[in-house]
Image (spheres, rainbow, N blue to C red):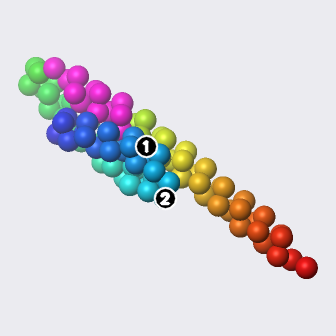
Amino acid sequence: MAIAGLVLGIVAVVFAFVPGLQWVGGICGIIGIVLCVLGKKKLAAAGSPTGTATAGLVLCIIGTVFALIMFVSCYLCASAAVGAAGSLLRF
């Protein structure tokens, strides 16, 4: 589970910066957070190192936050562009 969370964290960070696909990064980040937490608990109970799960958790959190910030930024820019275009078309 820790490796799957790490992969989803990498995907979340990559898709956080793709315009129009930030929602993919957010979803992958949230699912990755759950998998990393479960994997970390499982590895800790087995006495194994938890570095992969920790790295995945950090990447998932960063990817989710960046995806949220980029989504809001793109939404605000698009709404500002529509507002500016609407004011230009008024006679």
Q: Quadrant of the C terminus?
A: bottom right
Q: Quadrant of residue 11?
A: top left
Q: Relative to residue 69, is residue 82 drawn left or right?
A: right
The answer to which quarter of the image holds residue 83 is bottom right
How far is mark 1 from mark 2, CA to CA? 15 Å
Which residue shows up at 66% across the image and 55% down it? Answer: 77
Residue 20, position as x, y percentages in the image = 48, 58
Q: Is residue 80 left or right of residue 57?
A: right
Identify residue for label 2.
20
**Quadrant housing the N terminus:** top left
Indicate whether 15 appears above or below 3: below
Residue extending furthest toward the left: 46
Q: Amino acid at mark 2?
A: Gly
Which residue is painted at 83% across and 70% down in the image?
87
Farthest residue in the bottom direction?
91
Taking the magenta stretch, the answer to whether it contains residue 53 is yes
Circles 1 and 2, Cβ within 8 Å, touching? The answer is no
Number of the front mark, 1 or 2? 2
Q: Which residue is mark 1?
A: 64
Q: Residue at x 71, y 67 (%)?
A: 82
Q: Please, what secondary structure does the residue beneath circle 1 have?
A: helix
In terms of depth relative to the viewer, which is nearer, 13 or 53? Answer: 13
Residue 41 sits inside the magenta stretch: no
Q: Indicate the position of residue 68 as horizontal and vertical percent values.
A: 51, 47
* Residues in magenta, as a range: 49-60
Q: Residue at x 19, y 35 (%)?
A: 2
User: Would you say 28 lies left or right of 80 here?
Assistant: left
Badge 2, how many Cα within 10 Å: few under 14, some, many 20+?
A: few
Q: Residue furthest right?
A: 91
